[in-house]
Image: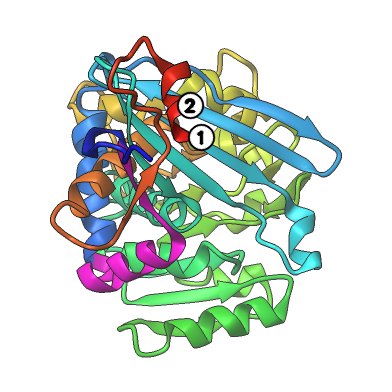
Amino acid sequence: MTQPSDKALVPFVSVDNMMRLVHHIGLEQMITQIATQIESDFKRWESFDKTPRIPAHSPHGVIELMPTSDGEAYGFKYVNGHPKNTSEGLQTVTAFGLLADVYTGYPTLLTEMTMLTALRTAATSALVGKYLAPKSATTMAMIGNGAQSEFQCLAFKAMCGIDTVRLYDTDANATAKCAANLQGKGLTVVACKTPEEAIEGAQIITTCTADKKNATILTDNMVGPGVHINAIGGDCPGKTELHSDILLRSEIFVEYPEQTRIEGEIQALDSDHPVTEMWEVMTGQAMGRTDDRQITLFDSVGFAIEDFSALRYIKNAIEGTDFFEPLDMLADPDDPRDLFGMLMRAG
């Protein structure tokens, strides 16, 4: 049987190898490095193809494709969001992604992205926090203590200098899980019984809940001047976390308005309500935080360029390592026109 050539083998990063890679590099270091790649790509925002992600909604959840290209490489992520999965012992979110060469169309990387999405989401949150959060911030409230929570806490520790996290979840077991996982990680961890208790003394408030509904995790009277809100739980139509009055008091920052107006907190506002795109802040074309009393809100829904950045980072990170498997997923006949002959010879 003809053996596939090297050019027909695609590096595949399994969940096991992704976890090995994280431990090899270091979790906080890897989050910081992914953030650097995201920032670099956001600064060349206009070179990318952009489209809202393509959803397939059902009563059970949503399955989405998130594609983009910079003209040289193409990337996409397949991701689901099924809040009911937790009650069945399954992950709410699972994902995989692919990177390809635009010139040949050949895939150059296939990787799990369940773990990688948690890393890139945390990296994006903390990267934005560097631009918008109060510079003296030391305490973050983490409301919603599910699968993303520890990544978020450690990202803000590594990149924004927080030293205390105050945890709250409607499920006390989730809070206990998060608190236990963060022990020994260089943070003071305070488990709270109410969201009001969690936000006491917090300069940064991260909301990350999973229920697919218009929820009110934060009410207007809970948000004082000068805080930065990192709202990452609202990510599909009909799913929000914040009372709309908070939005009216805040300077709102987004990734891609065309997607955020469909899926983010701002779906509750008029379609012409002003927002600022983060790439403009990162390139100096728009202002971030302007004073100590301003409420800044990052209405984060996740965007394909962040996944593209994470895929590029992984492709580079695995070179010269054994943290991947060569995958035979491309037919590679000696004569490109003789696919049938290749099939017959294999028999």
Question: Which mark, residue 347?
Answer: 1
Question: Which mark, residue 328?
Answer: none
Q: Secondary structure at mark 1?
A: loop
- Is residue 270 among what the camera can see? yes
Magenta: main secondary structure: helix
Q: Position of residue 74 (x, y in %)?
A: 34, 24
Q: Residues within 10 Å of mark 1 (few under 14, many from 20)?
A: few
The amino acid pointed to by label 1 is Gly
Residue 284 sits inside the magenta stretch: no
Q: Which quadrant holds the N terminus?
A: top left
The amino acid pointed to by label 2 is Leu
Image quadrant of residue 78?
top right
| Nearer to me, 70 or 182 | 70
| Nearer to me, 10 or 30 | 10
Residue 14 sits inside the magenta stretch: yes
Q: Position of residue 322 (x, y in %)?
A: 23, 63
| Nearer to me, 6 or 197 | 6
- As drawn, is 104 to the left or to the right of 229? left
Q: Position of residue 239 (x, y in %)?
A: 71, 40
Q: Which residues are magenta?
A: 9-28
**Residue at 23% across / 71% down in the picture?**
24
Question: Which mark, residue 343?
Answer: 2
- As drawn, is 297 to the left or to the right of 337? right
Q: Secondary structure at mark 2?
A: helix
- Is residue 161 among what the camera can see? no
Q: CA distance from mark 1 to mark 2?
A: 7 Å
Quick check: marks 1 and 2 in contact, CB under 8 Å?
yes
In front: label 1 or label 2: 1
Q: Position of residue 7 (x, y in %)?
A: 23, 33
Residue 95, above or below 68: below
**Residue at 73% across / 74% down in the picture?**
171
Residue 233, above or below 161: above
